Image (tube, rainbow, N blue to C red):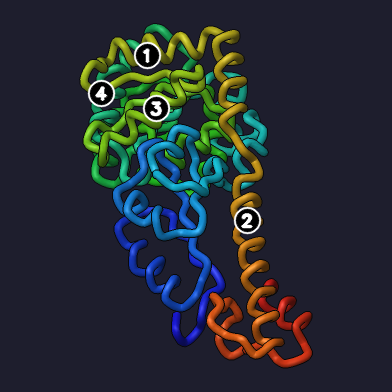
Amino acid sequence: FRLRRPAAVLAIGGFTIGAPILAGRRVGAATFLHEANSIPGRANRWLARWVDRAFVGFPQTAARLRHCRITVTGTPVRARFGAVDGRVCRRELGLEPDDPVLLVMGGSQGASAINEMVLAALPALRQQLARIQIIHLTGPRDYPRVEQAYASWPGKALVKDFVGEMEVLLGAATVAISRAGASTLAEFAASRLVSVVVPYPRAADNHQYYNARAMADTGAARLLEESVASPGALVSAVRGLVEDDEERRLMQAALKRWHQSEAAVQIASEIMARIGVCLLRDIEAAGTGRSGGRGVAPAGRGLEPGKPERALQESWHG
């Protein structure tokens, strides 16, 4: 940061964010954080007092960060989510375009508890939803065992340990069974994908439960806690969402209210506005020979006397 001074530093959570935020402050950068979860992480709670502005994904988070400059932006997701055709996605995956699809996922590493519950529920799923097709993301550890379990499944099933293009899978799905990570829920909202969410009970501060609770309280998801979940309860919840078109429509309407399509633009715009204010102040200070402001011009591109406009343009393009 001393060699190539940043104009701004944005932290998005995790224990590693403390050093770059504090280093950014030392070199005069504007500092920001984004908290995607309903319950803020420990690092973000600690850093909130030091940053210029905080962005949050859930409205409930604002009261839990204890920061006076908070913007509720939602959580940015790729624009491809929600911009796909379900029938096309199902064909692309080799599935029947007109039959319902259940997507099972537990995050990038999978979720053994969800995998076990779904495998136990397969006979009832087949009996009660004869046309159901399944996409099952297992995670690397459980993949061989889960793949073997589907060998006797009479319908269409796609079993993968990991998939990068999640927008295709979410686009193909009718209903999802999932953990309740903030990014996953944001992608569901963007895709209008109805879901049965089973929060990971050992997540820090039980934050996945509070993510799921916030969504479920507005009708945007069905919450099923792992401690009381059973294959029968899972099948009942999935069947209700597959067969009841009106319930799916109401849940999709609730999901629409959770999706903020301009989240990334809003975050970037507020950061750029702050950079612009700081830069103009430093231009004025340079013009009058004063110093001591929070400099934001990148290293190696000092402000040339008489050329403030070019300095401003270079900083914004940089």
Label located before the other in sequence (2 or 4): 4
Q: Which mark is residue 270?
A: 2
Of badges 3 and 1, the one in the foreground is: 3
In this view, 191 is above or below 291: above
User: How far apart in space, not on screen, are marks 3 and 1 (Cα)?
Assistant: 24 Å
Label located before the other in sequence (2 or 1): 1
Which residue is depicted at the point 30% across and 17% down?
A: 121
Which residue is depicted at the point 62% across and 30% down?
A: 86
Q: Mark 1 points at which residue?
A: 125
Label located before the other in sequence (3 or 1): 1
Q: Residues within 10 Å of mark 2 (few under 14, many from 20)?
A: some
Of badges 4 and 3, the one in the foreground is: 3
User: How far apart in space, not on screen, are marks 2 and 1 (Cα)?
Assistant: 48 Å
Instruction: Please tell me which residue lies in front, 271 or 232.
Output: 271
Give the x, y percent position of residue 148. Answer: 27, 33
Which residue is depicted at the point 35% across and 36% down?
A: 106
User: How far apart in space, not on screen, are marks 2 and 3 (Cα)?
Assistant: 28 Å
Label located before the other in sequence (4 or 3): 3
Q: Which mark is residue 226?
A: 4
Q: Name the residue under label 3.
A: 212
In this view, 300 is above or below 182: below
